[in-house]
Image (cartoon, rainbow, N blue to C red):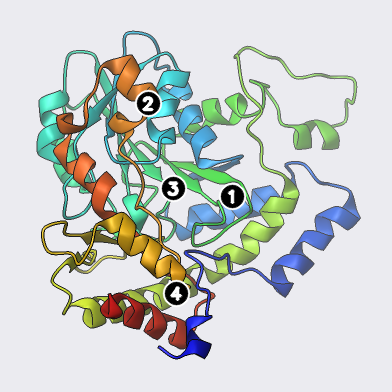
Amino acid sequence: MSDTVAHRQIQIATPATGEEEWQAAREPILSGWLTQGPKVAAFEKAFAERHRVDHALAVTSCTTGLHLILAALDLGPGDEVIVPAFTWVATANVVLYCGATPVLADVDPRTFNLDPEDVARRVTGRTKAVIAVHLFGLCADMVALRAAVPVGVVLVEDAACAAGASYRGRPAGGLGTAASFSFHPRKSITTGEGGMVTSDDQQLVERMDALRNHGASVSEEQRHHGPRPYLLPEFNLLGFNYRMTDLQGAVGLVQLGKLDGFIEERDRWAAFYRDELASLDWLRTPVGPEGDTHAWQAFVTYVDPRTAPMPRNDLMERLQSVGVSTRPGTHAVHMLGYYAERFGLSPDDFPGARDADRNSMAIPLHNRMSGEDYRYVVDALKAL
C-alpha cells in the first residue's frame, strides 16, 4: 500500500443518511407535531407492508421493543426464557427486566445463531419463550427451533440486525409470535435510536400498543383529534413510555424506502469479500442463506487461532494502524461480569459462544464505502 492510500480511514459502520432525511425531518419541526403522530403511523404501516406482517409498532429501541413483547406476554418471576449465549447483552437483560430468568444456550459456530440442539437441552417445565436472534442479519433456523421446544413455548425474534432479511421465503418479523427491530446507526437503516415491534397477533398488539404509552387506553393522537378535550385515558395496565417521535418516523420512512437497495449493495460486496478472502486459510467468512436474504448488518469473520499469523486482538490493532476499523462480532453474555457472577457461569460453559467472543472480527461493510475502500480492506487483510 502506498503512503497516500495508507492514510485512508475506513469506519466499521457509517449511516447512509443525507439530504432526503434532512428534508423529511423538517415537516414535523414546522408542523409542531414532534412526538408520536402521523409520521410514525405512516412508518409503521410501510414497515408492516414491507415485512408482510399485520401490525408494526414503533418504539424507542429494539431493547424496549423486546421488553414490551415479554411484558405483553405476562412473563415474570418463575418463568424461563432461553436466549443465545453470544448476543448483545440487551437480549438477556430484557428477561431480567420482567423478573423472569434468562437461560443461556450455545450458538452454532458456523452461523453464530442459536444451536437448536442445545436449546432442546435447556428446556424445562418453566420455559415460556425462546428469543431467537437473527445475528448480524442472518435469520436463525426458526423451523429447527420450533421443533426443539414444546408447542406452548413462544418464539420471539430479536431482529435487531435483520430489517429486510428473509427465511424460507418469509421476511423476518413474521417468523415467530412477535419480533423487535433496531434502527440504531450501526444498522442498515436508522432513525438515530429507535425500533419497531411486529406481530400478526391482534390481541398481543393491542396490549403492546397500550403498554408503550404508559398503559393508556387511547393514544395522544386520538385524544388530540377527539371532540372531548377534557377526557383523560383510562390506565388499567402498568405501562412504559416507549413511543417513537415523529421526527424519527419521518426519517424512518425515507430510510425504509432505501432498504432493499442498501441490502442489494451490501450483498454484492459481501460476495466480493468472500471471493477475495477465500485464499486466507486462517479467516473464515460468514455464510449466506440459500435462496433467502441475508441483511448483512455486519460482515463478521472468524479468526482461526490455530493458523492466524497473530492473535485476533493483534490483528485488529494492526488493521487499525493502517486505517481499517474492526470490532469483535459481539460478546458472550456468560463471560460478562454481571452474568458470570449472578449465575455462577464460566467461559467453558458455552464453548461456541466463548470462541466466538474471542475470535470473531467484523470488518467494514456499509453503504458509504466505495469500491476502492473494499479493495483497500482486502489488501490490508492479505498484507497481514
SS at mark 2 in the image: helix
Q: Spatial distance from mark 4 to mark 1, Cα to Cα?
A: 42 Å
Image: 346 above or below 376: above
The picture quadrant where one finds residue 363 is: bottom left
Across and down, in percent, residue 137 comes to: 35, 57
Tell me which label, 2 or 4, sits earlier in the chain: 4
Q: Are marks 2 and 4 in contact (CB under 8 Å)?
A: no
Q: Nearer the viewer, residue 337 or 244?
A: 337
Sequence-first tag of 3 and 2: 3
Amino acid at pointer 4: Val
Q: What separation in Å lies between label 3 and label 1 (alpha carbons)? A: 16 Å
- For marks 3 and 1, the one nearer the N-term is 1
Relative image position of residue 128 (x, y in whole percent): 28, 21
Mark sitting earlier along the chain (4/1): 1
Cα distance in 3D space between marks 3 and 4: 31 Å
Q: What residue did someone put label 1 on?
A: 44
Mark carried by residue 337: 2
Which amino acid type corresponds to the residue marked 2 in the rendered image? Answer: Gly
Q: Secondary structure at mark 3?
A: loop
Residue 64 visible within the image: yes
- Tell me the element at label 4: loop
Q: Secondary structure at mark 1?
A: helix
Residue beneath the point at 40% across and 88% down = 1
Q: Residues within 10 Å of mark 2 (few under 14, many from 20)?
A: few
Numbered mark located on residue 160 in the image: 3
